[in-house]
Amino acid sequence: MRRSREEALSPDECGPQDVVDAVDEPSDDPAAKLGVKLLYVDGTEALDDDRADVQGEVPGDPSTAVAREPDEVMTEIVEEVFRRAQRALRSLPKAERDDVYAVSLFVYDYEDEPSTPTVEVSVNWEAYVALRTPEASDADEARWNFAFWPQLPIDVIGGPTDPVGKQIIDQSFSDAGLAYDPDDYSDEAIQVGRRMTEAFVAACVAAVQRLHREGTVEAVFGAAVPVLVHELEYYDQIAEQNRVANPGELVEPFIRCIREM
């Protein structure tokens, strides 16, 4: 289970001005409607352990990887994450954009409930990496380990502080027949929670692809930078979903960092 927002926060947060100053198989299950598999354009599943692994060869061309075409129920989540992330990035003051090297879409479950997925949009700066490197094992850890990021969300999508986004997510899950009792700890309830998580992450991946495809990232930062869809902890699936979300080799340094952890 993903860690909560409170567990993910570092104790010494600072703002950008401080930085400047310092330096599946076919199923008739309703959940299948959400389209949670990630596919490369050649049709192979990006998360199929038998065919794709962060340590080995990736089928298809990662530079043109796409998520499975979402149907209507998932599209609402994709659209909301895309729209809000686009607005958040465009809201960054121009003076702060040149030093940005990566964007974060940090996904977590509010109060550990998969039925309330939340994503925070934030960025990190080269100056902040330099500031935190002495506290890390090396510069790569300071650069890619989210625990060393400032963790200053520009926008929070989902959860109780975002009734509009939460309603869209709730309705999408409801339309897909995904629901469980919070007091139910059965295997069936846990499986529903996993499907919710998979669906929400897939929506975030699709939104990131659209941010790149429609030129938002390059327009804001003047160049392509990686947009990471992640949790607090990193593992092979985190690497693979970001390879699918981002074009070319943008995330290869991030993936190398995961391999070395």
Image (cartoon, rainbow, N blue to C red):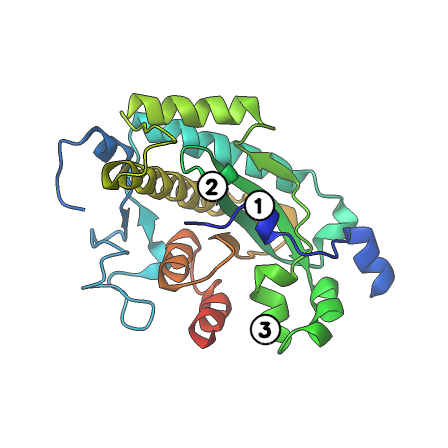
Q: Quadrant of residue 73?
A: top left
Q: Which amino acid type is marked by label 1?
A: Arg
Q: Crowding near pointer 3: few (<14 within 10 Å), some, many (20+)?
A: some
Q: Nearer the viewer, mark 2 or mark 3?
A: 2
Q: Nearer the viewer, mark 1 or mark 3?
A: 1
Residue 6 location in percent, x, y?
Answer: 61, 46
Residue at 69% in and 67% down = 129
Residue at 42% in and 34% down = 78
Q: Crowding near pointer 1: few (<14 within 10 Å), some, many (20+)?
A: some
Q: Say which of 44 and 181 sits in front.
A: 181
Q: Crowding near pointer 2: few (<14 within 10 Å), some, many (20+)?
A: some
Q: Which amino acid type is marked by label 2?
A: Asp
Q: Quadrant of residue 180?
A: top left
Q: Which amino acid type is marked by label 3?
A: Asp
Mark 3 — residue?
A: 140
Spot the residue most to the right.
21
Helix, strand or loop for disc 2: helix
The reply to whether dot 2 and dot 1 touch (C-beta < 8 Å) is no
N-term mark: 2 or 3: 2
In the image, is residue 113 above or below residue 104?
Answer: above
Q: Could you tell me how far apart the alpha carbons at marks 1 and 3 are, in whole angstroms? A: 23 Å
Mark 2 — residue?
A: 112
Residue at 45% in and 24% down = 168
Q: Quadrant of residue 22?
A: bottom right
Mark 1 — residue?
A: 5
Residue 8 location in percent, x, y?
Answer: 58, 52
Q: Could you tell me how far apart the alpha carbons at marks 2 and 3 are, in whole angstroms? A: 29 Å
- Compared across the picture, whether 97 is left or right of 17 comes to left
In the image, is residue 33 above or below residue 215?
Answer: above
- Compared across the picture, whether 188 is left or right of 14 comes to left
Residue at 24% in and 42% down = 187
